[in-house]
Amino acid sequence: MGVVGAGRVGAVLASALRAAGHTVVGASAVSHDSRDRVDALLPGVPVLEVPDVVERAELILLTVPDDALAGLVQGIADTGGWQPGQIVVHTAGRYGTDVLAPAQRAGAIPVALHPAMTFTGTSIDLARLVGCPFAVTAPGPVLPIGQALVVEIGGEPVALPEAARPLYHAALAHGANHLVTLVTQAMRVLGRAGVDEPGLYLGPLLTAALDGTLRDGELALTGPVLRGDAGTVAEHVATLVALAAEDAGLSDLPPAYRTLSRVTTQRAWSAGRLTDSAAQLLLDAVAETPALEATSHPAAGDDAAAEPAPSPVLVRTRADLREVLDQQRGTRAVVMTMGALHEGHLDLVREARRRADHVVVTIFVNPLQFAPGEDLDAYPRDLEADLAMLASVGADVVFAPGPDMMYPDGDPRVRVDPGPLASVLEGATRPTHFGGVLTVVLKLLHLTRPHVALFGQKDAQQLALVRAMVRDLDVDVEVVGVPIRREPDGLAMSSRNAYLGDADRSAALALSAALEAGRAAAGAGAEQVLAAAREHLAAEPGVRLDYLELVDPETMEPVSAGASGPCLLVVAAWVGSTRLIDNTILDLWKDE
C-alpha cells in the first residue's frame, strides 16, 4: 500500500495497516511535520512523489484535505496514473465514492472510510483506533473490502450510503469542532474571572454533561434556561456584552451565548419542558435590545436624536414583489399575517431577523379561510399602524396584495386539499378553513421564495398542516414554530382580542389558566390533565367550550390514556361573541 498525504490521519492509519501485515511501499510528505511523522510511525518507508506512490502500490490511501481531494484524483487520472484493480481509499468525511469516479473509470476500486475520532498524528492514536467507528461507503460488491480494512485496523465498520455522507459529516463537525470552540470560550471567560486553571473547574462539569447527553439526549439539560430563569440569562448577556466592550478579542461571546440560548429555549419549549410564557421571557432576555447594547447607542445626554427605523418597502403586486426580491442577496425569511399586528406577530419577525438576511412580511386577509357568516368584513385592518410596527423590528419588505391580485379569477379553481388532519378540532368547526389557509400559504411561499417561513404556535393545527404540506409536496423551505406571546395576565395575544369587552376579557383568562392546570397535572396522566383543565373552564360561566383535547402535536389525534412524551393540550371556546383558541405543549408522563 501507499500513502498520499502523510498527515496526522494518513501516517497513523498506514501504521495500523502495516501492523496488520500490509507492506507500505511509499508515502508522500511535503512538510517537515509530515516527514517527521513518516520517520516516527513508518520507519524505513521511503518518502516519494505522488506519481511514484501511485505507481508502486496496489492500495492507495488518500488522506489529503477535503477540498484538495477531487483535484488530486482528477490530476492523477489526467496523467494516466490509476491502474485497473487498484484499491483507492480516501478518508474525507464529506465525500462518498463519487469523488473517486475518475479513478473508477480507469478500473480502480473506490472505497471511502472515515474514522469518527480526532488525530494527534502520534502513536497515541493507534490505541484509540481500537473500537473506533468508521463510516464505510463503497459500491455493494466491494463494500466488504472497506469493512475488512477497518477490522484490520481494529475499528468498527458502519456502512453509510453515499447520499448520507454530507449530513453525517456535518453532524460530526458540529458536535466535535464546535464543542472545542464553545469550551474554549468558557475557559477564556473563566480566565477573565480570575480562575487560574479553568480546566479543573470545567472538567467534571463537562464530563458529566457529555455522559448524560450521550445517554439521555436533551433530558440531560440543566441550568437557567430549563429553569426558566430569564433574569439570570439576561444578566449573563449583559455581563458578556460588557466584557466584549472591554476586549475586542472576546466580541464573539455575546452572539454565541445568545444563539445557543435561543436554540436551547426552542428545544426545551418544543419538548414541553418550558411554558409558553417562560420561553418568551427567555427569548426576550437574549434579544439584541438597546438595553443590552447601550454602548452602540447615543448616551442619554446626547443632543443627537436617534435615527428613525427605516420603513419596509411596501409592494402590492406580483411584479413589484419580484423586482424587489430579485435585488436581494443572501437568505430570506417570510412571516405571513392578516394584519392587525401585535407583539406576537413581531416576535415572528424578530426570530425571522435572526435567521435570515432579509425578512418579508405578508399582510393579506384571506377570504378563502372565512366561511359565510364569519368575521371577514369586520376583521380589523390598519395597514399604516402595521407598517410602523414592522419598521421597529426590521422588516425589509411588506407584501400587501388585495384579493383581486391574489385571486384574479375570483374563487380559485385549484385549491390545496388539507387531508384528514384538517377534519378535526378547528376543522370540525370550520370545515373549509384549512383548505383556504394552505392554498394561500402555498401561493405566498411561491411568490416570496423564502428559505425559512415562521408561524406562531398559537395556531398549532395550522402549523402542523403547513409542515405536512411542505413535507408531502416537497416545498423547499424550512418551517419554524415560534412560542405563543401572552399578555402579562396570561391571555394569548390575538387580533380577535380587540373584540373583547372588559367582562369578556376577564372571562377569557380561564383558557390560559386551564392550560396551566393541565400542565401541572402532566405527571398524573392524560385523563387527569384533561380533568384539571375542564374544571377551570367549567368554573367560568362566561366561557362556552367548543373543544378541549390532548393530542399528538403532528397528527392532532387524541392521545391514549397511557400515553407519554410531548403532547399538545388545545382549547377553543366562545367568550361572548368572540371565538378564541389557545394551546400549550406539555411532557406527559405517569408518576408511579
Image: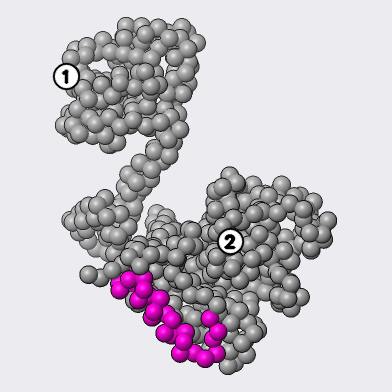
Q: Label 1: few (<14), some or many (≥20) within 10 Å?
A: few
Mark 2 vs mark 1, CA separation in Å: 63 Å
Q: In the visual, does 360 lie left or right of 214?
A: right
Along the line of sight, the residue nearer the viewer: 508 or 16: 508
Q: Is residue 525 magenta?
A: yes
Which quadrant holds residue 94? top left
Pinpoint residue 257: horizontal percent, then vertical percent.
40, 60
- Which residue is depicted at the point 22% across and 20% down? 17
The magenta span reads 522-545
Query: Which residue matches tag 1?
Result: 19
Residue 422 tag number: 2
| Amino acid carrying mark 2 in the image | Ala
Does 362 sit above or below residue 51? Answer: below
429 magenta-colored: no
Q: Residue at x 37, y 18 (%)?
A: 141
Left-right relation of 20 to 299: left
Q: Nearer the viewer, residue 569 or 70?
A: 569
N-terminal-most mark, 2 or 1: 1
Q: Nearer the viewer, residue 379 or 294?
A: 379
- The amino acid type found where label 1 is placed reads Ala
Please give the name of the residue rendered at 63% of the width and 78% of the height, measured from the top-left corner.
496
